[in-house]
Amino acid sequence: MCGGRGTRLGAPEKPLVEVGGLPMVAAVRRALGASRVERVYAVTAPHAPETAAALDCPQVEAPGDGYVPDLQHALADDRVTEPVLTVAADVPLLTAAAVDHALDAGTGATTVAVPVGRKRALGVSADTTFRVDGRRLAPSGLNIVGAGEGLVVATDTGLAVNVNRPRDLRRARWLAASD
């Protein structure tokens, strides 16, 4: 889990923006805690001190250079060994079942992606997309880092809703209230 600035969402620290009565990072942490994941580490950044203070797990402090560089920094930490399941802190509807499904389906390094059509149907953004076998997919924010290469295509709502824009936040809140 990494934390960033939440200025687009009207908050100083994006992971602390609430969805369904919980900060997004707490919702992700809850899903991981209910899954088969054995250990949870949070990747924190200097510009998100309130997020770091709110976490109830070991932390790896990264420089705060962005999601991918900070994740690479964390993966170089001696405490973290592959394979590693990574998840962004802005996937507030994540469920333990979706995490476990990725663990079951993954073989080594695995990208968990969502069909762009599913994201559009839910009314959320799909900023980054790629094609595989003619299908337009978007990263879910959940991946497995390790040897090999794999792809899991999921249609789970919790993986489809990645809060990057105010519209995504409104939709996540609406979906959380609908549950």
Image (cartoon, helix red, strand yellow):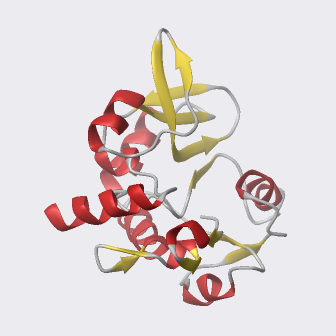
Identify the residue at the far left of this view.
Answer: 178
**Residue 117 placed where, x, y %?**
34, 28
Query: In this image, 147 relative to 174: left or right?
Result: right
Q: Return the residue nearer the eye: 56 or 124.
A: 124
Q: Quadrant of the image for the C terminus?
A: bottom left
Kindly indicate the quadrant of the structure image that contains residue 43: bottom right
Query: In this image, 179 relative to 66: left or right?
Result: left
Q: Quadrant of the image for the N terminus?
A: bottom right
Q: Residue at x 70, y 48 (%)?
A: 82
Q: Residue at x 35, y 47 (%)?
A: 98
**Residue 116 placed where, x, y %?**
41, 30
Asked whether the viewer can see residue 179, the reply is no
**Residue 144 placed where, x, y %?**
59, 43
Identify the residue at the far top of this view.
Answer: 133
Relative to 177, residue 144 above or below: above
Query: In this image, 80 relative to 170: left or right?
Result: right
Q: Return the residue nearer the eye: 83 or 153.
A: 153
**Residue 70 placed where, x, y %?**
77, 60
Q: Return the residue nearer the eye: 10 or 69.
A: 10
Q: Residue at x 19, y 67 (%)?
A: 177
